[in-house]
Image: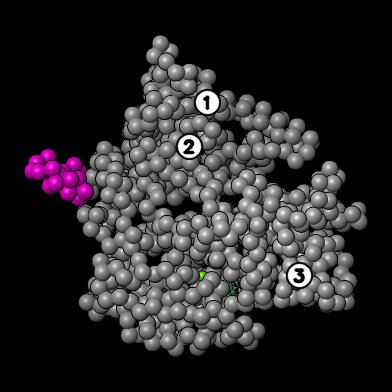
């Protein structure tokens, strides 16, 4: 029996999925696997675990996987609150942290966490139900988990310990799961939940701007704010606020240090409330300066956009509801990497007398539902990492999203009342979008997955029941890399070409491979950890690996400045960072370790100073990256100790820099992991085309690759280098470069 608060119970009963509780539970009783489809916000994530709990499935753990850490944490808190249960019972586990106890009955986790658990116990005996949530996102781990669970569930039934599998998706495109004989012999039933969604009017732009979509998003948002009435929530707040005027004291402001809030308050004091300028890339908001105001005067001129703010169903001219542009916007950012406390703000009502405006990435597309959103401005773009399967070159590109995603975005406007979605592109452009986004597994290298699967004794990865299989080339490339790293054993070379091909795709795992699979990093880095025992290098290898797996440790000081003042500050900080980098790069032999030595030096210095936000700010380091590195160092240290307890490695916050001898070892270890990422400088006498000046040649790429001006090795340009990855921006640049040959 669950003792819910009447208020929360009332809100629950309004969710469309409540009407389907019987149908869902009956299907679950009668089938080992069930697919549930329902619009975002229909209540799948928060309610289905509760249905299962109340129907008596909590004899074991009810596990729910999310592709994003944000969702795992916030959903566990929400469900605990709705059920009036402690977080000891409704808990979460993500990569670094969790609050799971031995009383835990409902456990939210990231899909990677469950995959690791399958490695320890293939039958997942502690679980009575596993729910794979957000299956429409088609994240790599989600796909693998569904493949594995399609085998685990029948095995559990055979052993007389039945387990249920639920797959939940926000789109109806579930054929990859249901019409897939390899996956499920009997197709699982699909239950559709009709969302009680309010109508959302879609407004297309007549023209589609190909460049300045952030500027367009800003202008559209300003226009909405100036001309259209607020949604219900802020409407009520305004009324209340008029009735009972509230003077904000510094205590009421909580610990709200957000730049935007500060600026708004300042603007308010001056009684000249101006609209913020939103830079969609920076998540900071500034009041518009005079120069811009002039330019904005032209917005009222709607000639080429037509009456794009016409709203048919909610007249803007009633007394009750009207736009009031003097109300400040309360602008909040929302993206995955944002700290959880900051993220939680979007769920709370905005401060009295303000209007909420959330600037969000795809997180808000499906995984989180922000209450009370009435207008959605959709730029139609998505920023994705592209990876060239042949050359290994990565790049981030902003491309058009899919129709399914655009429709998801629009749907966010109709959660509490009829809404509007402004698409910053034309209906013709929309018509050219792909229907659905591709599964991630087809777009990235798969060596990490292949190693994990081999560790689960799945030797013939090609035969694995993937909902969408990765390409054969990607699988071959992965096995080859793993063989070269010593994680897999090369098959004996015999028989016909066909037989050899097949053998190349079913190499068995080696003891080294098993050790590598236990480290939560990509195989190249796992190899480095496995070699680190030598010459007391392990603490350094752990620190370097932790740093290499975090996306970017330096703050972006090349960003455009918003004022002259900021610009001169940035120049100062850049100079300081350059100086520090030179210091961290060390001297003599250390210099050859290049960028990796700089990373090691930066992490060492930061830890030595206690890893404070102040130190990071002063030295151009990203505080969040440093905190993540610290956690990862702890985790990798534990993982290494678990594999070879005799080394007894520990995290030393006062780690001294490596000796010359250790640097030599470190370079060899790095080379062992990055051996296929070798580049040779093109000799001056061989240059025929000027584009090769200072360029490097790699085995697979026809064009030159370069050392970035910010690299520690930019001035030296050693003959041979290894790199972490190649990122294409204005040129193809190597990242994380270290020298191979000592001159
Ligand atoms: P689905 O999984 O189908 O997208 P959810 O179960 O996530 O739906 O959400 C159901 C409802 O619960 C939504 O209307 C959402 O706004 C509300 N909700 C979810 N999390 C919170 C929260 N932390 N605070 C307030 N409301 C929430
Ligand atoms: Mg959900």
Q: Pointers 2 and 3 in contact (CB under 8 A)?
A: no
What segment carries the magenta color? Answer: 489-506
Q: Residues within 10 Å of mark 2 (few under 14, many from 20)?
A: some
Element assignment for label 2:
strand
The quadrant in which the C terminus is found is top left
Q: Residue at x 50, y 64 (%)?
A: 404
Q: With 558 as the anchor, is 108 left or right in this view?
A: left
User: Which residue is more in the foreground, 126 or 701?
Assistant: 701
Q: Earlier in the sequence, mark 2 or mark 1?
A: 1
Estimate the spatial distance between the alpha carbons at disc 2 and disc 3, rounded to whole Å.
43 Å
Q: Residue at x 58, y 85 (%)?
A: 13
Residue 546: image location, x then y, percent: 46, 43
Q: Earlier in the sequence, mark 1 or mark 3?
A: 3
Q: Earlier in the sequence, mark 2 or mark 3?
A: 3
Element assignment for label 3:
loop
- Is residue 26 visible in the rendered structure shown here? yes
Residue 377: image location, x then y, percent: 65, 60
Whether the magenta-drawn stretch holds residue 137 is answered as: no
Q: Which residue is mark 2?
A: 727
Furthest toward the left, the residue is 495
Residue 6: image location, x then y, percent: 63, 87
Q: Which residue is mark 3?
A: 230
Q: Which residue is mark 1?
A: 712
Query: Which colour style is shown?
Result: one colour
Element assignment for label 1:
loop
Q: With 36 as the anchor, is 449 left or right in this view?
A: left
């Amino acid at each position: 029996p669950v003792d819910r608060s009447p208020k929360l119970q009332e809100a629950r009963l309004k969710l469309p999925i409540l009407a389907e509780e019987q149908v869902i539970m009956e299907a679950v009783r009668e089938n080992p696997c069930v697919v549930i489809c329902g619009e975002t916000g229909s209540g799948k994530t928060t309610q289905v675990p509760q249905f299962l709990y109340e129907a008596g499935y909590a004899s074991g753990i009810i596990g729910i996987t999310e592709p994003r850490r944000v969702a795992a944490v916030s959903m566990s808190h929400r469900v605990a609150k709705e059920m009036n249960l402690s977080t000891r019972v409704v808990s979460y586990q993500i990569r670094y942290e969790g609050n799971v106890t031995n009383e835990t009955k409902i456990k939210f986790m990231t899909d990677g966490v469950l995959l690791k658990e399958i490695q320890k116990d293939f039958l997942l005996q502690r679980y009575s139900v596993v729910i794979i949530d957000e299956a429409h996102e088609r994240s790599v781990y989600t796909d693998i988990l569904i493949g594995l669970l399609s085998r685990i569930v029948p095995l559990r039934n055979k052993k007389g310990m039945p387990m249920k599998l639920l797959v939940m998706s926000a789109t109806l495109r579930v054929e990859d799961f249901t019409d897939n004989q390899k996956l499920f012999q009997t197709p699982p039933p699909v239950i559709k939940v009709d969302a009680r969604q309010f109508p959302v009017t879609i407004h297309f732009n007549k023209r589609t701007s190909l460049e300045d979509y952030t500027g367009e998003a800003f202008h559209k948002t300003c226009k909405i704010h100036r001309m259209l009435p607020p949604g219900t929530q802020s409407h009520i707040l305004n009324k209340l606020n008029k009735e009972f005027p509230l003077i904000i004291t510094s205590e009421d402001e909580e610990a709200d240090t957000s730049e935007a809030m500060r600026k708004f308050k300042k603007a308010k004091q001056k009684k000249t409330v101006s609209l913020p300028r939103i830079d969609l890339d920076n998540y900071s908001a500034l009041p518009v300066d005079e120069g811009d105001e002039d330019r904005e005067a032209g917005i009222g001129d709607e000639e080429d956009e037509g009456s794009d703010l016409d709203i048919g169903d909610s007249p803007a001219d009633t007394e009750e509801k009207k736009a009031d542009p003097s109300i400040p916007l309360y602008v909040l950012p929302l993206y995955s990497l944002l700290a959880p406390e900051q993220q939680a703000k979007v769920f709370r009502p905005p401060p009295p007398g303000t209007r909420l405006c959330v600037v969000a990435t795809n997180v808000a597309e499906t995984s989180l539902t922000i209450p009370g959103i009435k207008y959605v401005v959709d730029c139609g773009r998505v920023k994705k990492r592209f990876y060239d399967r042949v050359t290994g070159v990565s790049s981030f590109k902003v491309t058009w999203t899919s129709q399914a995603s655009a429709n998801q975005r629009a749907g966010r406007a109709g959660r509490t009342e009829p809404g509007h979605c402004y698409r910053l592109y034309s209906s013709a452009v929309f018509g050219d979008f792909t229907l659905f986004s591709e599964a991630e597994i087809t777009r990235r290298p798969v060596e990490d997955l292949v190693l994990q699967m081999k560790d689960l004794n799945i030797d013939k990865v090609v035969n694995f029941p993937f909902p969408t299989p990765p390409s054969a080339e990607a699988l071959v490339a992965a096995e080859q890399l793993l063989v070269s790293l010593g994680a897999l054993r090369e098959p004996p070379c015999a028989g016909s070409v066909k037989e050899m091909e097949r053998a190349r795709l079913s190499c068995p795992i080696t003891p080294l491979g098993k050790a590598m699979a236990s480290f939560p990093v990509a195989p190249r880095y796992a190899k480095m950890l496995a070699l680190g025992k030598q010459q007391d290098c392990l603490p350094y290898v752990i620190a370097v690996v932790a740093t290499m797996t975090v996306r970017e440790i330096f703050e972006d000081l090349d960003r455009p400045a918003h004022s002259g003042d900021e610009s001169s500050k940035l120049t100062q900080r850049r100079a300081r960072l350059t100086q520090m980098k030179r210091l961290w790069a060390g001297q003599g032999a250390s210099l050859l370790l290049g960028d990796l030595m700089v990373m090691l030096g930066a992490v060492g210095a930061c830890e030595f100073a206690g890893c404070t936000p102040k130190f990071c700010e002063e030295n151009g380091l990203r505080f969040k990256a440093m905190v993540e590195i610290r956690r990862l160092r702890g985790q990798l240290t534990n993982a290494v100790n678990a594999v070879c307890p005799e080394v007894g490695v520990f995290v030393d916050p006062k780690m001294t820099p490596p000796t010359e001898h250790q640097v030599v070892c470190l370079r060899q270890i790095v080379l062992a992991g990055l051996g296929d990422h070798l580049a040779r400088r093109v000799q001056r006498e061989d240059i025929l085309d000027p584009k090769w000046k200072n360029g490097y040649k790699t085995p697979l790429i026809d064009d030159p690759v370069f050392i970035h001006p910010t690299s520690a090795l930019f001035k030296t340009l050693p003959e041979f280098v290894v790199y972490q990855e190649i990122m294409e921006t204005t040129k193809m640049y190597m990242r994380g470069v270290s020298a191979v040959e000592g001159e």
